[in-house]
Image (cartoon, grey):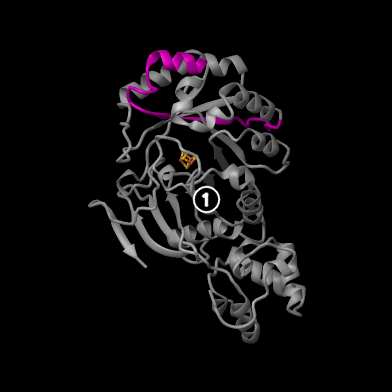
Amino acid sequence: MANTGVRIKGKELGMEFEPSINLTGLTANELTTFVCSLGEPAYRARQIFAGVHDRRLRSFADMTDLPSELRGRLTDQSAVATLKVESRYVSTDGTRRYLFKTHDNRPVETVFIPEERRDTICFSSQSGCPLQCTFCLTAQLGLLRNLTAGEIVEQVIFALNDAYGVGVKPPRGTNLVGMGAGEPFLNFDALIKAIRIMAEPSGLHIVPNRVTVSTAGIVPRILELAAIPDRPHLAVSLAAPNDELRDELMPINKKWPLRELLSACKEFERSLRPNERMTFEYVMLADVNDADEQARQLANLLNRYDLRAKVNLIPHNQAEPLPYHPSPPARVETFREILESKGIHAFVRRPRGRDILAACGQLAARSQAHPSQQSDNF
Ligand code: SF4
């Protein structure tokens, strides 16, 4: 990010961006407003938008279709890449974890997961997280701050460039999941804006139908999401089949208990498209929430609300110093079978990137390398 020259603050354009404008977080219309404020024609905005989101360039110097004088002014007054890569880890299974720092030195983590049919990028919506799920390492950071829309989009651009090369079209297409650090629904506006920017056909063109956001259960936002016509898919993290245990594992449950959460999901169901289901995630913690009786309770709970949903069982990933252990595979399978026997579609999520601390619940902005990690410090 340049530190010289005159800076036009986002506020002057009716936008909130500090300390300088991150153009990666502007919609095509906002970018046009910004470019016109520089006395440039609107088509320059289209060139810049394509440069950032289609060609995935991370500096104005590389946008050689722009006059060099304009590139200089853009560099002085704005930025397209504000995240700095601190570390990059590559798992034996191909999963990659990136640890970035924001301009104000906050950690941001992103995970790229290659899959046979389609790659998945798991992005963070906050630096740290204010919720205190006891099975999650991110919780220990507390909330450092919300990420901007630009910081969310940058994570995806960087991961795609790293996996395939700058601007190279991903061969298998890309799914996005908002399941990294943070509670996405506590940064709702930036999240939705980032998803819209990434959906632009002249840019990344990752449509909302390829995006899933996961909430710990922020009930008002579930209802708000339902009202958005081009919304992403919804996943809700349950982790427990009753309020008593969920209060303990996910304290947000004390504010919005299961009755309110599942009623909101029932309301959300009305917005489901044909063949769409919502997802419930259930992290499997050995001897805590993985008993046969708890599987039956979970099935009964979901059947009571008769939801068009599936359950993803996520074997817990060892995350010291947390006092939990993964449920053994046979236990996970039995749990799944009980759910299925009661008419609940249930799947076991294959853990990815465990050796590089990239799996669910393991993101804690740790930069020291585990012995099995390969680390490239940029
Ligand atoms: S599980 Fe998600 S919502 Fe809960 S503390 Fe971790 S990052 Fe936050």
Residue 278 is left or right of residue 114, and the answer is right
Q: Is residue 293 magenta?
A: yes
Residue 136 horizontal/vertical position (percent): 41, 39
Q: Classify the position of the C terminus by image quarter.
A: bottom left
Q: Position of residue 152 (x, y in %)?
A: 55, 55
Q: Which residue occupies the foreground of this view, 213 or 11?
A: 11
| Residue sitting at the far bottom | 69
- What residue occupies the far left of the structure in this picture? 371
| Magenta highlight range | 271-299
Q: Tell which of 59 and 34 is nearer to you.
A: 34
Residue type at numbered disc 1: Gln
User: Is residue 239 left or right of 315 when viewed as pictured?
Assistant: right
Task: Name the quadrant containing residue 66.
Answer: bottom right
Please state the horizontal and vertical placement of residue 118, each as a whole percent of the image: 49, 46
Label 1 lies in ligand 1 vicinity (Cβ under 8 Å): yes
Q: Residue at x 44, y 42 (%)?
A: 139
Asked if residue 161 is among those painted magenta in the image, a careful observer would answer: no
The image quadrant of residue 52 is bottom right
Camera-side residue of 104 and 208: 104
Q: Is residue 205 left or right of residue 165?
A: right
Q: Which residue is mark 1?
A: 126
